[in-house]
Image: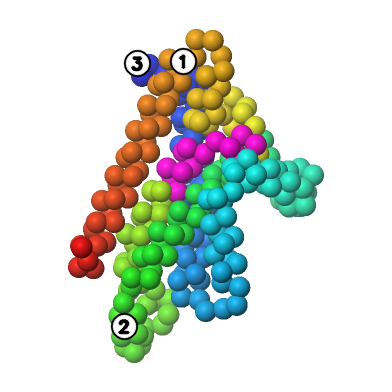
Amino acid sequence: MFDLSPDEAMAIRLSLRVAFWAVAASLPFGVLVAFILARGRFWGKPVLDGLVHLPLILPPVVTGYLLLVLFGRQGPLGRFLDETFGIVFAFRWTGAALACAIMGFPLMVRAIRLSIETVDRRLEHAAGTLGANPAWVFATVTLPLILPGIVVGIILSFARSMGEFGATITFVSNIPGQTRTLPSAIYTLTQVPGGDAGAFRLTAISVAVSMAALILSEVVSRLISRRLGTP
């Protein structure tokens, strides 16, 4: 049942590659934005919060179209990146990674933000009174405390990236070997005669990856609750 064809195996490898880089590229920004939303007090915070979570409620096709408008070769950002740095996102696997990063970003930020909000600020203040500078306080006190939330955010964002379809196919199309990720491959197989077996194989793999991510995130969440002494 899981004797994958070369095209199916390539789609899985590409999805793993895209999901990895989507998470790796968005993680620093996810931690930063989560800190701003958890600790910041400024005008416009609800707007920032809304923008961060907007991909969760927008149709993925809309997100993909906006990316195409902004990062396409004729888009303002796409033209600038292409002419200045030679970076092209549209119809490339890097564009798929960008789309997946944006779609998974709200899940990552939310998990990290909830973890930050559970940190006892007195521990950070105590480290500061002992002479530690803010960077050292973050590295030795805050980071270990929020690490479970970061892990949960990474897992959820990775799983979301593995399952992303609408924004990806709109922004980078469905090019075999270049932008045909796991969901796109499933969609393609459902459109061709005799593709049901391959679609079922890839669907089973997709379900397994999603379930594994949910179980891992639940286990880490329980570890957080146990550490904090909450039920």
Residue at horizontal 50%, vertical 46%? 21
Residue position for label 3? 1
Q: Is the magenta stretch mostly helix, strand or loop?
A: helix
Residue nearest the viewer, comparing 42 with 90: 42
Residue located beneath label 2 in the image? 122
Residue at 50 percent across and 76 percent down: it is 40
Q: Is residue 132 visible?
A: yes
**Magenta highlight range:** 157-170
Split into 4 quadrants, where in the image is the C terminus? bottom left
| Quarter occupied by residue 54 | bottom right
Residue 118 - label: none
Going from the N terminus, do you reach mark 1 or mark 3 first? 3
According to the picture, the residue beneath numbered tag 1 turns out to be 196
Looking at the image, how many numbered discs can be counted on the residues? 3
Q: State whether residue 25 is above or below residue 48.
A: above
Residue 156 percent location from the top left of the image = 41, 48
Q: Residues within 10 Å of mark 2 (few under 14, many from 20)?
A: few
Decide if residue 81 is on the left or right side of residue 20: right
> Is the Cβ of the residue at disc 2 closer than 8 Å to that at disc 1?
no
Q: Is mark 2 on a helix, strand or loop?
A: helix
- How much space separates mark 2 and mark 1, taking CA atoms? 58 Å
* Residue 198 screen position, x and y as percent: 45, 17
**Splitting the image into 4 quarters, where does residue 225 fall?**
bottom left
